[in-house]
Image (tube, grey):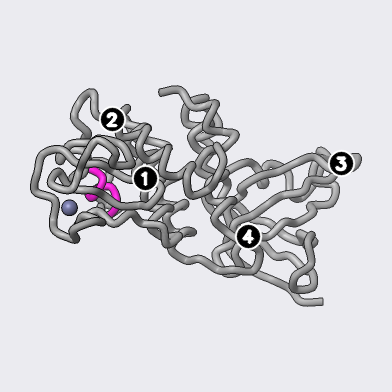
């Protein structure tokens, strides 16, 4: 039976049978993988305390390719991310991040960029002073890395760079309509040029500089609403853990 060895992040865990756990990992080398950790809830289990939400771990598991449930054989902690589990607000944002990642990843499909993004974002989430900005950037980066980046540099009707101060963000189409082409029947949501520039920044910002991106007061909520609506239009549903977030 093939053996898989990889670094991974715990996305989700559920109790199973008398003392087992079913853990969904986002692995660095093989995409998403669901494993059964036998007797993991027993006091003297070798897995004890190593399969907590968000933990970054080195794991060994076995199972046939395309098998639904793999068998977890070994697990060592790399980064515990325990601070995320000690603070309700950080915990719920972490759950939101992992639920989004779980949606955009598949079993057996490696995604190095999404893996690095999640790892860096969980680390930043432990210490950031602005969880909302971090969440917005996370949402935009996942959207972009999954191939759904909105087209923000040119108008979808005239193809010119938008010059007016007012324009429409046409969320369902993932584009913008410039002031010149706008009329009363134009689809989408009215935004100003400042908001558009922040959207562009969130899409392209280097993750080392995330802490330096400040949103003007009053704009952060609007911004959050835009990324949320956009994400929902791509996914076709609201993420369960989003309801837990405190603004
Ligand atoms: Zn136009």
Nearer mark to the viewer, of 3 and 4? 4
State which tag comes first along the sequence, 3 or 2.
3
Quarter of the image with the C terminus in it? top left
Magenta-drawn stretch contains 199: yes
State which tag comes first along the sequence, 1 or 3.
3
CA separation, marks 4 and 1? 29 Å
Q: What number is the disc on residue 220? A: 2
User: Badge 1 local density, few (<14 within 10 Å), some, or many (20+)?
Assistant: many
* Above or below for 3 versus 182: below
Q: Secondary structure at mark 2?
A: helix
CA separation, marks 3 and 4? 23 Å
For mark 3, what is the residue? 19
Q: Position of residue 162 (x, y in %)?
A: 13, 51
Q: Quadrant of residue 230?
A: top left
State which tag comes first along the sequence, 2 or 4.
4
Q: Which residues are magenta?
A: 198-203
User: Badge 4 local density, few (<14 within 10 Å), some, or many (20+)?
Assistant: many
Nearer mark to the viewer, of 4 and 1? 1
Mark 2 sits near ligand 1, with its Cβ under 8 Å away: no
Residues marked 3 and 2 touching at CB (< 8 Å): no
The residue drawn where x is 15% and y is 41% is 193
For mark 1, what is the residue? 171
* Above or below for 163 versus 148: above
Q: Secondary structure at mark 4?
A: strand
Residue 87 showing in the rendered view: no
């Amino acid at each position: 039976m093939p053996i898989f060895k990889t670094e991974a992040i715990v996305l989700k865990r559920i109790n199973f049978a008398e003392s087992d756990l079913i853990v969904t990992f986002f692995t660095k080398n093989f995409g998403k993988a669901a494993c059964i950790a036998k007797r993991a809830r027993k006091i003297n289990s070798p897995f004890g305390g190593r399969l907590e939400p968000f933990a970054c771990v080195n794991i060994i598991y076995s199972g046939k390719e395309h098998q639904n449930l793999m068998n977890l054989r070994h697990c060592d902690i790399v980064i515990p991310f325990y601070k995320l589990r000690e603070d309700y607000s950080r915990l719920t944002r972490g759950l939101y991040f992992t639920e989004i990642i779980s949606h955009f990843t598949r079993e057996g499909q490696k995604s190095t960029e999404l893996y690095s993004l999640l790892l860096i974002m969980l680390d930043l989430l432990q210490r950031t002073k602005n969880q909302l900005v971090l969440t917005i950037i996370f949402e935009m980066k996942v959207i972009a890395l999954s191939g759904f980046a909105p087209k923000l540099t040119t108008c979808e009707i005239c193809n010119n760079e938008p010059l007016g101060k007012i324009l429409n963000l046409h969320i369902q189409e993932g584009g913008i309509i410039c002031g010149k082409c706008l009329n009363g029947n134009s689809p989408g949501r009215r935004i100003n040029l400042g908001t558009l520039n922040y959207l562009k920044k969130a899409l392209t910002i280097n993750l080392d500089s995330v802490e330096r991106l400040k949103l003007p007061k009053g704009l952060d909520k609007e911004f959050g609403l835009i990324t949320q609506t956009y994400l929902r239009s791509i996914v076709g549903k609201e993420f369960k853990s989003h309801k837990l977030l405190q603004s």
